[in-house]
Amino acid sequence: MPDDVTRALSAAADETAAPATPTTAEPRPVPAAVPVSAPAADRRPVERTHHGHTFVDDYEWLRAKEDPEVIAHLEAENAWTRDRLAHLAPLREQVFAEIKDRTLETDLSVPARQGAYWYYVRTVEGQQYPIHARVPVTGPDDWTPPSLAPGEVPAGEQLLLDQNAAAAGHDFFSLGSFALSGDGGRLVYAVDTTGDERYTVRVRDLITGEDLPDVIEEAFPGAVITPDGRHVFYSTVDEAWRPYRVWRHVVGTPAADDVLVFEEPDERFWVGAGLSRDGRFVQIELGSKNTSESWLLESDDAAGEFRVVWERREGVEYTVEPAVLPGRGQALLILHDDGAQNFELVAADVPAAGAGPADPADAAVVVPHDPDVRLESVDAFATHVVLGVRRDATPRVAVVALDGLVPGVPWTARELEFDEPLHSAALAANPEFATPALRVHGTSFVTPTTVYDIDLATGERVVRKRQEVLGGYDPGDYAQSREWATAEDGTRVPISLVWKRDAVTLDAAGTGADPAPLLLYGYGAYEISMDPYFSVPRLSLLDRGVVFAVAHVRGGGEMGRTWYEQGRLEHKRNTFTDFVACARHLVGTGWTTPERMVADGGSAGGLLMGAVANLAPEMFAGVLAGVPFVDALTSILDPSLPLTVVEWEEWGNPLADPEVYAYMRSYSPYENVPDDASHYPRILAVTSLHDTRVLYVEPAKWVARLRAAGAPALLKIEMSAGHGGVSGRYARWEEIAFEHAWTLDVLGLADGS
């Protein structure tokens, strides 16, 4: 099941990823025998009965991943898709070339100081993956990052990890951990080379550049190393792919000797380990969809006992940030939602060893709850505290100066201002606790990602880097705006739009005077917000006259916690009807027509795509569904599948509750495909064989049933990838070009483009 928005958010990093591949798009190999007709999966009915209702599933046999007959069917689907879309090969190559030509392929990040080094990531033209490196800091007061040209390998550079070398010989590669010891002497990193998110953890001696004998298999992402470089903490998963155990590894000893330091038996909870910014604490955090708990251990006593901060209470979420506060010393900043739906921030003492959990009633409120402002994060530094806040559907950064705070008086936070009404702002890399400058990145639909350093003493803002877009990109050639649709229940739903000014005709009211082709994106789950972001690949759509729109439907977090609550559990249908309302608004205000609109969503957004295809097929010319959660009821009914129990708090438990079963049955896309779907829009489902979050079988079954009902559906399945799709930037650009070409074809823009 989907627990994140991997595919949705990967678009924001289209340009940043970096084994070597050709620098022009190459089509996938085509079988010698061209299919003469669409694959028709055999109907092998099995019955599933719950709460007095029996569902006959004709295609459940496709779940047998190791069955050669299943693989043959999937390969036949790929061959059919290649054949049906062969005419788009020139357009795919052109879009790929546009993405490549606009991207500074040899580039590097702004160096970030940590200890005695400046750390950065660089990419090299022709290489798929990034290279991690560092250079020494010149002096204790050197807080200005070195100015490095994109193609420059600076004098004194030390190579830490070349992902291209690590990925050599593998069709897939993902880096799941990258953590440094406090003195910079050791690196712990983790890699996945299949896409199933089972990572191998290694420890590298950065003095010699060699990996130590330590090898930890089958770990979950997020391993950390203590400041002294002697201990590694990591988590492992159970049979349902849930991270439930935390282990302590002593560097230089066999993994078989690792000590289990925490185990969570409740199948609703995920568990992970981290390190506080000041390096003082190892933190274990565990959470379900609505309840959380944190444990602490002094990092210089790694063999000691973890102690709980607040004992878990059902329905209460909290996160802990160690801080040093004036007049109080070492303390904990706790962001929680107990009686504060949009969260409030309190200050509390660090629990003493052996004293038991702290009493939440003893904490002092420092940032009160605000029904109009969602507090999303807190980060503590030596002189300031930084809050991530969401107001008016926009993510913002607010800063609190610790100097001058009065005990008992709520804090005053200063929001960082940006010029654009539609923008996103968030903390960038800030590894140092005692830093004189705060690094922030900002972006919008038209402004490339920009990295700022903000002097914490003066407030002066310095632009360190703005993503370079080659080919003469001018933000002024593009426009963005916010519209509001009215949902079935009268709720106003925000829609964000971006377009090229000279390609779209507007009337005096600022809406469409001449309907334009439009791509409408949506997600709507897990309180994840689809915020404004710049994308180089998106320019290939905008420059051809396509309007890109985001429907900020309920189930996401754009309008605060209430927005999320109104789009989950027994309110889940709001997500789907909101999206349809947004589509109808865009048609009604002249932005587009149903014949010129494509819907797009991935993972939980793929569930949204399947639902709206059933609810309002007449509203769309095409539906693009990435790793789509379209067989939701089947999956949520089976607690033996990865993540099912964890997901019950998001969707409900249909196994135990007949009302939840009936409600999910009413919207689950696979079960609601009608006998005659010949009137459906064109559908393209994209998935991956090794996805452990949304199993490939869901879109495979969905497409089989759609096609049997007469719907024009295609399936593209990556045979060496996971939930996030293919790895490597060039491979990712090829995938985007494939999807963009299909979208343009549906919109009638493939010819002469």
Image (cartoon, helix red, strand yellow):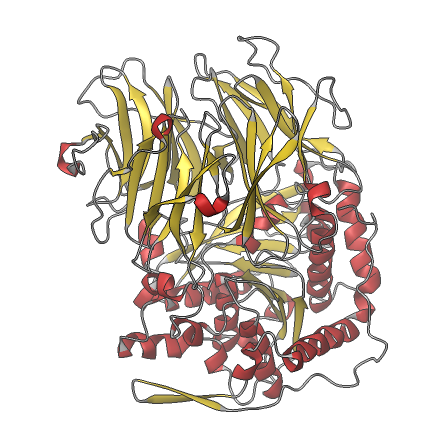
Left or right: 512, with 279 as reference point: right
Visible residue check, residue 579: yes
**In the image, residue 687 above or below residue 638:** above
Left or right: 575, with 481 as reference point: left
Q: Residue at x 55, y 29 (%)?
A: 186
Q: 643 or 698, which lies in front?
A: 643
Q: Position of residue 254 (x, y in %)?
A: 50, 42
Q: Residue at x 46, y 25 (%)?
A: 228
Q: Quadrant of residue 736?
A: bottom right
Q: 33 or 270, which lies in front?
A: 270
**In the image, residue 408 above or below residue 469:** above
Q: Position of residue 431 (x, y in %)?
A: 49, 26
**In the image, residue 681 above or below residue 434:** below
Left or right: 715, with 666 as reference point: right
Q: Quadrant of residue 448?
A: top right
**In the image, residue 554 above or below residue 656:** above
Task: Point out the image quarter for the C terminus.
Answer: bottom right
Q: Position of residue 264 (x, y in %)?
A: 31, 53
Q: Residue at x 47, y 89 (%)?
A: 46
* Number of callouts: 0
Visible residue check, residue 508: no
Left or right: 53, with 496 as reference point: left
Q: Residue at x 24, y 37 (%)?
A: 309
Q: Position of residue 64 (x, y in %)?
A: 56, 78
